[in-house]
Amino acid sequence: MNKLARPHREADYLALKGATRRLVEACGGVESAAAVTRTGFQVLSKYGRPQEPVFAPVDVVADLEADAGDPFVTRALAQLAGHVLVPLPRAEAGQGRWYRHISEIAMDAGAVVQRLGEAIADDGEVTKAECRTLALRERVREAIAELAALDHALADLERGER
């Protein structure tokens, strides 16, 4: 790849290339992917090759992610920027949605705290193995998703949509 002075490590750019390759594969390969965006299959192939200095434009990424149904590149970019990508919830109807959000947040947060307590109980530390065995990051992601769902519902309420 190009050796210009850039703000990210070479490994970060390679991760974006890898996410692009996985995205194109999820679209059925370069020829199928070319059918849903403005870029031809040869250029799409270049976007995923580590030795090529070109990256997929954002409109091409948007087209491909819509087709794949998964934000491969957007997730990699969010991680590179130090953020987490959380899907917005589908619309819900009825008054019970508030109770569901609150109870899900409480249960997910409680699961995180309980599992952290289990990890800390024996030696006062959380190890890499305990993190994996107790699925701590998975539980945290579930709690974040529920908080995002609540935020989305509150935003709808503020806009008068619910």
Image (cartoon, helix red, strand yellow):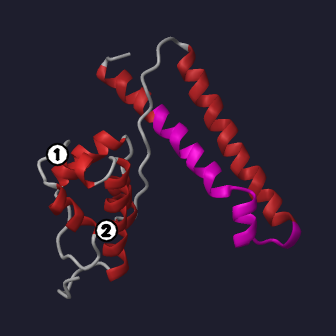
Residue 35 point in image, percent of width and height: 19, 43
* Range of residues picked out in magenta: 122-150
Residue 157 point in image, percent of width and height: 38, 22
Q: Is residue 147 magenta?
A: yes
Mark 2, secondary structure of its residue:
helix
Q: Amino acid at mark 1?
A: Thr
| Residue linked to disc 1 | 37
Q: In the drawing, does residue 72 fall left or right of residue 47?
A: right
Sequence-wise, the earlier of marks 2 and 1 is: 2
Q: Amino acid at mark 2?
A: Lys
Q: Residues at badges 2 and 1 in contact (C-beta under 8 Å)?
A: no
In-front residue for pair 50/35: 35
| Residue linked to disc 2 | 17
Q: Quadrant of residue 98?
A: top right
In-front residue for pair 101/5: 5
Where's the N terminus, which quadrant? bottom left
